[in-house]
Amino acid sequence: MSDAARLLAQAERGPWLADLPEALAPLTEAEAYAIQMAGVGQIAGWKTGAVPGPRPPTHGAIGAARVLTGALPAHLAPAEVEVEIALILARDLPARAAPYDEAEVLAALGPAHAALELVRSRFVNRKAVSGLTALADGLSCGGVVIGSGTEAWRDLAFEELSVTLAGQAPLAEVRGPATRQQTVTALTVLANHAARLGVGMRAGQFVITGARIGPLVLEPGQELVATVENIGEVRLAI
């Protein structure tokens, strides 16, 4: 494990870091990904963004220790919450020299699930560090909860689905923003990123595809229930 990855690991349960020391901070995207991957351990999933932006997308590998069920762990409080659509890999997309195309990635996908991402950086202020340092920190993924899902998602218009989040009262309801096609395109970019890293993607891993709701800071003492129309529901006590 690199010195930067070791510092991030030590900050997992606090005290959180103001920043990485200048000598350890990544100067290139390749260095940021190297730090990120050094601290991941067993990869359970990935995060990417399905809505195209002005810059090429970045990605985060998510370790098995960040897969949550039931209740929010104390070390993640306070956390921000996002409601997302997760897709599960039904077959491997191993590392290889030739790039994957969308048809290959689409054929490798299994069910879609409702999911929550807990946004929790290991920095005091995640917005105060550089983009490369945030990338090294796994894009502030504190944890993921995967809810129920469906195999019958391929004909759904993702941008038209109602997505809701409720606690003690309704918190948010939206439609959009990313389409099914944008989601598959983002997963194809991610598959080629994982191949370049030399790890590929494996059957059973999930991919969270970007916030449909959030990030929202929520009050403790309630059970969150998020629903993605025609896909599934996910719960977490906070």
Image: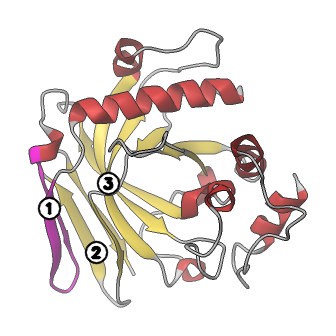
Element assignment for label 2: strand
> On residue 224, which mark appears?
2
Task: From the top left corner, tell me how far across and down residue 147 is, in percent.
Answer: 32, 54
**Is 132 above or below relative to 48?**
below
Q: Which residue is depicted at the point 29% across and 45% down?
A: 113
Q: Is residue 167 magenta?
A: yes
Looking at the rendered image, the quarter that the C terminus falls into is: bottom left
* Residue 116 image-quadrant placement: bottom left
> On residue 174, which mark appears?
1
Nearer the N terminus, badge 2 or badge 1? 1
Marks 3 and 2: in contact by CB < 8 Å?
A: no
Q: How would you rate the neighbour count of disc 1 (Cα within 10 Å): few for under 14, some for 14-19, many for 20 or more?
A: some
Which residues fall within the magenta stretch? 160-175
Taking the view exactly as shown, the residue that stands out farthest to the front is 54
Q: Which residue is depicted at the point 65% across and 64% down?
A: 130
> On residue 84, which mark appears?
3
**Is 108 above or below relative to 220?**
above
